[in-house]
Every structure is written in C-alpha cells, then in structure tokens.
Amino acid sequence: MPADLKIAEIKAYPTSFPVPPENRVALGIGTAVKRDAVVVKVRTEGGLVGWGESHHGRAHTAVAKLIETTLAQLVLGMDASDVVGVWKRIYDKQLASHGMGAGTCLAMSGIDCALWDIRGQAAGMPLYQLLGGAKKGIPAYAGGVSLGFQAPGPLIDELRRNLALGYKAVKLRVGDAVKRDIGRIRAVRQACGEDLVILTDANIGYSVEDVRRVMPALDELKVGWLEEPFPAHDYRSYSIAKGFGRTPLAAGENHYTRFEFNRVIEDGAITILQPDLSKTGGITEALRIAAMASAYKLPIHPHSSMTGLNHAASIHFLCAIDNGGYFEGDVSRANKFRDELVSKPYEVDKDGNVWPLDKPGLGLEVNEAFLEQHPAIEGPGYI
Ligand SMILES: [Mg+2]
C-alpha cells in the first residue's frame, strides 16, 4: 500500500438547520420542521481529504457517534483505496453477526463515499471515469422534500417554477387521502399536459386497500411509478399490491445492502429500485446492487438524499451503470445542504438533464465553516 493512502483520521459532523414555517412541506411521513445530515471527512497520512454523506436515519448524532467511536477504529490504518476491503472489514466485524442494522449501513455509507473521493483524487480522475463510466447528461426529476399535500393551485404554481428550470419529470406526494391524492395528480396532468412524466411517492402512507383504490387512477393518468406505498419490510403487502394495476411499484431508499435487495428482486413485486448511496452501504454496495439488478433487467433510480455530496456521488454513479434511470433532483425550498454546504451544487439544464463534475474524485469542496455554523439540533425532524 502506498503509505500516503493510509487512513489517518475519520471525522463525522452531524449538522442541522430549522425549516421555517413558510417553507414546511407535509408528506406521508409528516411535516418537515428541520433538516439533518451527517457529513464524513476522511484524511490520509499523505494529506488527501475525502468527503462523504451518511444519511441521518432520524438519528444523526447517533450515526456520527457510531462512525467516530466504532467504525473509525475498525478501519484506521487501512488503505483508503481498498474500498472492498474496508467494506468487508465493517461487514465482518459489525454487520454480519447482528443482522442488517440500519445504523451501521448508514454510517459505513459516508465512509465509503469519502474513500471513493480519495481514490479519485489519488488517480487524478473524476469519479464517473474511475467507476468505468463516461460523461453524459442524466435525466432528472423534480423531487426532494417538496410538492407536498397543498391544494392543487399552489401545487401547480410550485411545480411550474420547477419546470421552468428545465425539469421534464416530477414526483408528487401521495398517501394523504386517496381522493385528494387523485385530485392533485389529475389537476397536474390537466395543467401540464401528456408529456410531463409524473411519478408518485406515498412515503408509506397507504394501506393495501388504499392502493387497491388508487391504482386505477394512477394507470389512467399514466403515472410512472408508485413509490413506497408501504414500509420497506412489508414484503407481503407489496406482493399483493403488485396485482392491482399496471403502474410499477418502486422502493429501495430504505432497503439496505445487496442482502436486502436480493429478496426485493427475487420477489418481483418492486420493479423500480431506488438504493440511496448514503444509506445502502455506499457507492461500493450500490454498484453491486446495480449489477445484480442489471442481470434481471431492472432499472436503478437512486434516492438522492440530503446534501450536495450525495447529489454529486449519485450523478457520477448514474454515469457508470448500464441500467441507470433518473437522478432525483432536490427542489426542496431553501435546502442549505444543497446550496451552501458544497462548492458546486448540481444544476439541471434546459433539457432536464444533470451532468457529473469534472474535477478528480467527487469534484467539489465542502464549506467547513458551514458545519461549524450549523451544529446538530436534537429532536424529531418530521412532526
Ligand atoms: Mg421516497
């Protein structure tokens, strides 16, 4: 191992900002009152610094603590370019014996991303190239914590502002009440026309009976997918609901590692796979999930999560897999983690595409002053 790539330090920063009342959005999981994230910094003996994101998992201070007090001790001194070896060490020592604990998966995801950032810098290659991909435009949909349960009029106003940025696809929130959900989708379809790609996300807000009732309308209104009608572990409900119509079921942002995606794929009920690089075990694991899905001809539309770090990583990743779909654009109102934390927030072009960054590694810097100015706020993020 080149001495300068030895992992010398791992730090994790839990960070938060409050969402002011005028920017709050109601979704199937409640109303967002603050935003949380965990930013991971890895430094090598030679002085290379890599950055990654661990999803907060509604326990951002606990995830950061797990990184600094346990996972760091497992991997300090290892070769930062040995992402497979680091992954296996954490799997062997932390994950394998006690089940797929979400905490460790979240925590290891941020470390893995930071190691890929370092690998890219050491190789002098942008991440998409290092991963075997090419620079290309990736279609993006307008998603994130946005477009919630408001009345159709304000919803269409908010949507039109996003379509003006270039987006050709949008994800609407459902899981409010079936009748109101259908009313919103119908209003958007009528206002924006047949060409707009409409996707939907219930954030676990539906029962099996709700999906039975909503599905004919989703089919009629040509909705691209119904995401997370049920919790991730509710495999039986997904199997039942699959038969209700033509609109495909989507999930994956709350499925962890290839060892949970193997069941998702074998069950055949969820056919739109949405692993999140900051949750499912990092870029290393998301590549394995994508390869497994590719063998079944299933597309990967990664959930993109909280910060500009995961946005950048997800775009590189989508440039390097052969079954990639949409990038989840984050059109949340005033997301400081998108706009202020990183030096190069992603941009959508007039054709609705996003592009990977060209500098080595992830291709951006982190504003460390932001992390000092936005310490963790304890308490629930959705009420
Ligand atoms: Mg979702």
Image: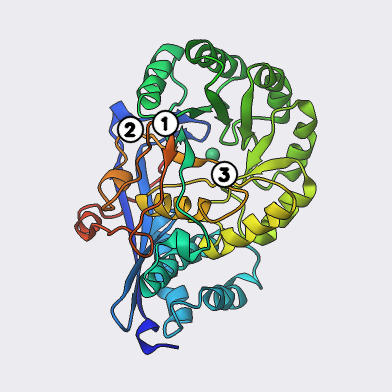
Residue holding disc 1: 146
Label 1: how many Cα within 10 Å (few below 14, some 14–19, many 20+): many
How far apart in space, not on screen, are marks 1 and 3 (Cα)? 18 Å
Indicate which disc residue 235 carries.
none
| 76, 24: nearer the viewer | 76
In the picture, which quadrant includes the N terminus?
Answer: bottom left
**Residue displayed at 51% across by 35% down:** 29
Q: Residues within 10 Å of mark 3 (few under 14, many from 20)?
A: many
Residue of label 2: 333
In the displayed structure, 358 sits above or below 108; it is above
Could you say which is closer to the camera, residue 217 or residue 97? 217
Label 2 amino acid?
Arg
SS category of the residue bearing label 2: loop
Q: CA distance from mark 3 to mark 2?
A: 22 Å
Q: Amino acid at mark 1?
A: Ser
Percent coordinates x, y for residue 304 in the rendering:
47, 46
Residue type at mark 3 is His
Q: Quadrant of ligand 1?
A: top right
Left or right: residue 81 versus residue 200 is left
Q: Tell me whether the residue at label 3 lies in contact with that at label 2, contact meaning CB atoms closer than 8 angstroms.
A: no
x and y percentages locating residue 58 in the rendered image: 45, 50
| x, y percent for residue 49 | 31, 71
Q: Nearer the viewer, residue 209 or 106?
A: 106
Horizontal side, residue 317 vs residue 381: left or right = right
Which percent across, then down, holds residue 214?
67, 21
